[in-house]
Image (cartoon, helix red, strand yellow):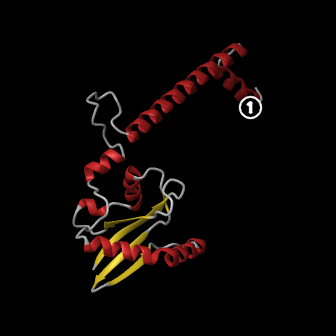
Amino acid sequence: MDIYRVVCSENQQLYPNETFVDFMPAGMNRSENSVIHDSILKMRRLANPDVESLCNGLLLYDFGAGRIELKFEKAYNHIIRRNQENFRKNYEHLIIRRFKEMRESGKDKTLNINTSTLAVVYDFYKKDSNNLNVPQSAREMELRRKAEDYRQQQKRRNELIEKANERSKEERPFTSEQFLAWKMAHYQGD
């Protein structure tokens, strides 16, 4: 039995009467086979920009001898399950026909996806930068931005504490220890 991830996408304004159906093996024997549905959609967008996914979590099971089944990942919302069934009714024949065409041509996937291509698509590293001070990915840039925001918040917090301490010293002619001693004396009846 072979399992494939399936992503159907389209944009009728840019690509009229065209539905793109992409397949990727979902087996665990190679790292490229463990690609998620979103990655497949990103790769499709490299070839056909601005396409949108029609469904999420669709898997195709090829049991051999022409027996093919489409299954969705478990959805707990009844509206999503209803939409999945409607999608199955409208697109199941197209998906199976495209899968058979792909297999007859001797291929096991519709897009050429490997880990280095995914690294570029997800911006894991930049090829043109050798400077270590420049962020190497979008994630690193976001982490640096958050760290700088945190430093700025801490700086503002410390400034506010210092101002409050200065104001408290200016308003009272005595120290906080003297005030506490007076309060204790007041409660003890002295």
Residue 126: x and y, percent? 31, 37
The answer, for residue 172, to whether it is visible in the render is no
Which residue is the site of mark 1? 188
Label 1 sits on a secondary structure element that is: helix
Residue 154: x and y, percent? 52, 29
Asked whether 16 or 119 is in front, the reply is 16
Residue 124: x and y, percent? 33, 43
Q: Is residue 62 left or right of residue 180?
A: left
Q: Is residue 173 left or right of residue 41?
A: right
Residue in the picture at 26% in, 59% down: 32
Q: With respect to residue 150, does 83 lie above or below?
A: below
Locate residue 182: give its quadrant: top right
Categorize mark 1 by other alpha carbons within 10 Å: few (<14), some (14-19), many (20+).
few
Q: With respect to residue 7, does 135 lie above or below?
A: above
The mark total stands at: 1
Residue in the picture at 37% in, 61% down: 36
Name the residue type under label 1.
Answer: Gln
Locate residue 20: give its quadrant: bottom left
Instruction: Give the quadrant of the C terminus.
Output: top right
Asked whether 167 or 106 is in front, the reply is 106
